Image (cartoon, helix red, strand yellow):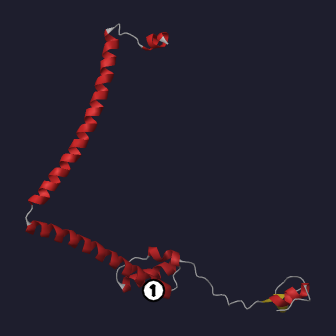
Amino acid sequence: MESDASESFKPITSQAEFDAAIKGRISRAEKAAEKKATARIAELEGIVHQFESEKLSEDEKRDRKLQELTAALAERENMIKGFEREKLVASLADEKELPRKFWDRVRGESEEEILADIDVLLEALPKNEKKPPRDGTIKVTPSGDDGGTEMSAADVIRSFDPSFTS
């Protein structure tokens, strides 16, 4: 045990070793002092803010509160305006059959501007040819070409399973 303790302690034998040891201690002390100073500064800033708040007159407090409420109201009004615009865009885009994924690309504030932009977007999109709705009937030929006998889905199933009932 004594040999471990004597091996861990190394006496300083040169000025360079002494300077390095002192430099390390100074660095640790500076970090600790900086941490304490930062905490104290934050504490003092809180005290100053509290003191300034107490120092304000009632009128100044009311003015500050009014400014805060006015700013909050303006923010809410902007949010409402945005929601109303989104609702208008959704209504007009749905009416004009603009695909939903393009709604966020619509520009304009007034109804006329929005409609004009929707029309521009619709012109840029490829035209989908309207296909008649399927009624479940398919034309089937032995070769698989169109133009053969018309059969419903139930008829096709019955051709494989005669016991099928629809």
Residue visible at 63% across and 85% down in the picture: 129
Task: Evaluate whether residue 147 shows in this view.
Answer: no
Q: Which residue is mark 1?
A: 91
Residue 109: x %, y % from top left? 35, 80
Q: Position of residue 11 (x, y in %)?
A: 37, 9
Which one is in front, 160 or 120?
160
Name the quadrant containing residue 29. top left
x and y percentages locating residue 163 in the rendered image: 91, 89
- For label 1, the SS is helix
User: Percent x, y for residue 75?
Assistant: 28, 72
Question: Residue drawn 10% across and 66% down?
Answer: 60
> In the displayed structure, would residue 22 be above or below residue 164?
above
Q: Quadrant of the rendered structure where residue 110 is?
A: bottom left
Amino acid type of the residue that numbered disc 1 sits on in the rendered structure: Ser
Residue ID at (33%, 75%):
79
Give the residue furthest to the top. 13
Work out whether residue 150 or residue 57 is closer to the camera in this orientation and state it.
Answer: 57
Q: What is the quadrant of the C terminus in the image?
A: bottom right
Tell whether 23 sits left or right of 62.
right
Crowding around mark 1 (Cα neighbors within 10 Å: few <14, some 14 to 19, many 20+) is few
